[in-house]
Amino acid sequence: MKKITLIALISFFLGIFLAGMVFFYFPEKNTSENFLYEPNFSSSPAVLHASPSPQAKSDLNFVKVADKVGPSVVRITTERVEKRKATGFGDDWPFEDFWDRFFGTPRGREQEYRSEARGAGFFISSDGYVVTNNHLIENAVKVTVFSLQDKEYKAKIVGTDPRTDLALLKIDDKNLPFAELADSAQLRVGEWVLAIGNPWGLEHTVTAGIVSAKGRQLGGSLNVPEYQDYIQTDAAINRGNSGGPLVNMKGEVVGINAIILAPTGGNIGIGFAIPSNLARKIVKQLKDKGKVIRGYLGVRTGDLTEDEREALKLETKKGAFVHEVSSGTPADKAEIKPYDVIIEIDGKPVKSSNDLKFKIAEIEPGKKINIKVIREGKERVVDAKLIELDADREQKSSDSSEKDLGFSYTTLTQQIARRLGLQTQEGVLIAEVTRFSEAARKELQAGDIILEANREKIRNERDLTKIINKLDPGDTLMLKIRRETSRETIEFIRTLRIPE
């Protein structure tokens, strides 16, 4: 009995000793330092993964990333002076602020308003260049930059690009901390990112999330830039984050925070950033030239639907489907036609309408390019010599007519129609009507669309100017007008007499 008891005691203590040795030499079997580790409480088979996680535990050091990038992030405040004028539209005209910014034309008595905007930006070089959003500094008379070191600088606007919502600023200082731009093409959906900025005035706030999607396009609403290739993230982005960096776990900038989807005005986990690869190209031109120069082809395109692919007997939906070709443009001269599908530019495949827009924009004006299209089931190659996309083409009204009828006008482009919410995209848009003029007496209004002049169809401002300039003092000009309001859309005719 004593022998059995002795053996049991020896076995008990030996078991404790061996267990202690196992826990001492193999602690990872007992616990995990990886905060992503989750114990498996179920009896189900182990989950099989196709590949290891792209970001190991050692890469998820948010503190290290924030310490590295944080000093390069700045707070930006801008002072704006806006001069607004009465329109006479009353409640039927919801585009007052946009019209002043878009056309810059005077209407009625002028009033001056001052406002302040706040956002973020970051240094991209040690000599004081700062990247931010264009919408933050647009119409600014004063731009002030505040660094993390609590220094205040008066900033100079080097250049802006409303089409991508990017801007470049410059301050006078040296040896500044700066952030490096990553290759955003290498960014993967699901990858961890940090957003740094000043949401709601809370300086230098860092939030974490993942890349929710890439290549997002948000359509053509009023506040969205023309060139879109957004990174979507669920990192908390609010008002004041605009212009701040979106950073990967290497401490590199992969995007510039620009837009939030916020029906309630706050973060709902859907934010958008401009990819660093796009920003790099834009910033370089702004630094070198003060503006962005883009190629222009002159087509309005869209993506192919499945029904269109089937109707055109195409194998895939890849390419840019030509809806319209503008008169006198490189596309018109190259005899590109509606219903053509553009599939290649200089041997490079065109994936979509948006892809075509970016490819054309990146080509230097004056260069001759080869365009492969599919027309009636057959491939053909045409040559086109691009011209420069005029940054002011859709932003200035025209006063080119020699006859003063009391109104100025501009071609109604797709972009203007989309931004103003108009149903039609044809004709000439009246930008301003002078008080007590012939046009005002005949009750024309800013926002009216001229469809015909002296019974001739009007496609652009050149058509209208040509007709007006042929008229002598005392002659009449008969206009067919379309007016769209929140209540109704009407068409009517007004006859004006050329002043003597």
Image (cartoon, rainbow, N blue to C red):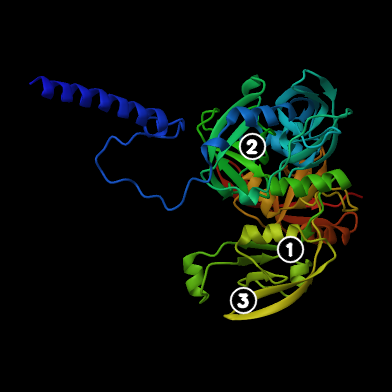
| Mark closest to the chain's N terminus, 2 or 1 | 2
Q: Name the amino acid type tagged 1.
A: Gly
Q: Name the amino acid type tagged 3.
A: Ile
Tell me residue 435's x, y (percent).
81, 36
Residue at the spot of label 2: 246
For the image, the number of numbered tags is: 3
Secondary element at image label 1: loop
Q: Residues within 10 Å of mark 3 (few under 14, many from 20)?
A: some
Q: Is residue 238 visible?
A: no
Q: Is residue 263 above or below residue 366?
A: above
**Hey, which quadrant is residue 208 in on the image?**
top right
Alpha-carbon distance for marks 2 and 1?
A: 34 Å
Residue at the spot of label 1: 298
Residue at the spot of label 3: 374
Q: Residue at x 60, y 33 (%)?
A: 194
Tell me residue 323's x, y (percent).
62, 65
Alpha-carbon distance for marks 3 and 1?
A: 18 Å
Tell me residue 459's x, y (percent).
73, 61
Please state which of the two labelled residues, at mark 3 or mark 2, is closer to the viewer.
Answer: 2
| Mark closest to the chain's N terminus, 3 or 2 | 2
Rendered-image quadrant of the N terminus = top left
Q: Residue at x 49, y 45 (%)?
A: 53
Q: Is residue 355 left or right of residue 208?
A: right
Q: Name the amino acid type tagged 2.
A: Leu
Q: Tags 2 and 1 in contact by the CB under 8 Å rule?
A: no
Q: Is residue 225 above or below residue 131?
A: below
Alpha-carbon distance for marks 3 and 2?
A: 40 Å
Secondary element at image label 3: strand
